[in-house]
Image: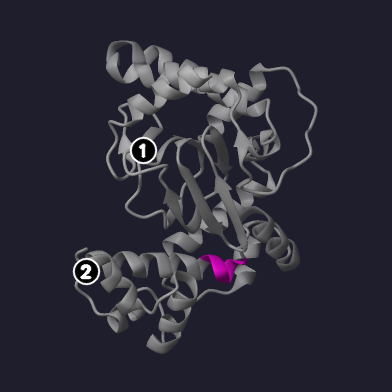
Amino acid sequence: MNNDLNELRHLVMRAQNRWTDTGLPRVAMVRAEACADQVYPPMLHLVLQGAKTLSIGDQVSTYGPSSYFVVPVDVPATGQVHPCAADSPYLALSLTLEPSVIAALLADTLNTPERPRPQRFAAVQAQPEMLDAWLRMMRLMDRPNEAAVLAPMIEREILFRALQGPLRETLVDMARPDGRLTQIRRATEWIRQHYTEPFRVEPLAAMTDMSVAAFYRHFKAITAMTPIQYQKRLRLLRARWLLLFDTLDAASIAFTVGYESASQFSREYARLFGLPPAKDAARFKTPT
């Protein structure tokens, strides 16, 4: 297992300080991260070196080496990475999850008894068999002629190993076209597309074929946030990106992301990121 992990780390050292395309379908890699605050798409995320702490709604989780977690729907998260040392950066891999691939795999495998559901976004230790499959996948970066045939097969193997573990039921939920998770995904997609606009919960509940009470309950269970908290996180993450990479001032950004009050924006921004907008931006832009 240690040999596989070490070789995986060596391969992922090619990545940049952001999520980097590997040339393999749905597979990306990262060497440290400029910022762990982002909207995570549905993915299986494997930590190879260092650690990551993520705050998703009211849940805070820490992921260490050779652990993985599953994100079943798009979720806005804040957090940070923790390298082992200056010469040992945070390293990770991700596999974007495609419900149809999981569904096809489930159709081809024997039924497995349901497992107790762990806490949403829980850390799970990767089995040696999963790390072996990941290593064979990443070796295909240097074998593009083989990748077209072998990568889909290894993707199925990685998912098969995940389906044997504690997060099986989350993956099974993703594959159900009429399940609660799929219904909530419709709502999260709508909120992401209209995050600057005010909305009422009743139409979203109707969109998912649920009562308002059931919609609230399932939305919170799947995303660890209420719909309004979800929208707020989207707005604040987008605002932070604009503060760091655009020339707009904080008040203009507040209105750009949908706030009607610059002072409310400043309060909520400081509550999430620890500093008011201008001071937070200055922290990243000031040379060290």
Query: Where residue 184 sits: x, y (%)?
Result: 61, 54
Q: Nearer the viewer, residue 288 or 221?
A: 288
Judge left or right: residue 276 versus residue 200: left
Which label number is shown at residue 286? Answer: 2
Query: Where residue 232 sits: x, y (%)?
Result: 49, 71
The crowding category of the residue bearing disc 2, from other C-alpha atoms within 10 Å (few below 14, some 14 to 19, many at least 20), is few
Magenta stretch: includes residue 227: yes
Residue 24's place in the image compared with 199, above or below, is above
Judge left or right: residue 45 versus residue 284: right
Q: Amino acid at mark 1?
A: Ser
Which label number is shown at residue 88? Answer: 1
Residue 195 visible to the viewer: no
* Label total for image: 2
Distance (Cα) linking label 1 and label 2: 25 Å
Magenta stretch: includes residue 244: no
- Quadrant containing the C terminus is bottom left
Q: Amino acid at mark 2?
A: Thr
Image-quadrant location for residue 241: bottom left
Residue lying at 34% horizontally and 73% vertically, measured from the top left: 280
Residue lying at 42% horizontally and 61% vertically, measured from the top left: 193
Residue lying at 37% horizontally and 35% vertically, measured from the top left: 29
Query: Where residue 186 sits: x, y (%)?
Result: 55, 53
* Numbered disc 2: secondary structure: loop
* Numbered disc 1: secondary structure: loop
Magenta stretch in the rendered image = 226-230
Residue 170 visible to the viewer: yes
Image-quadrant location for residue 27: top left
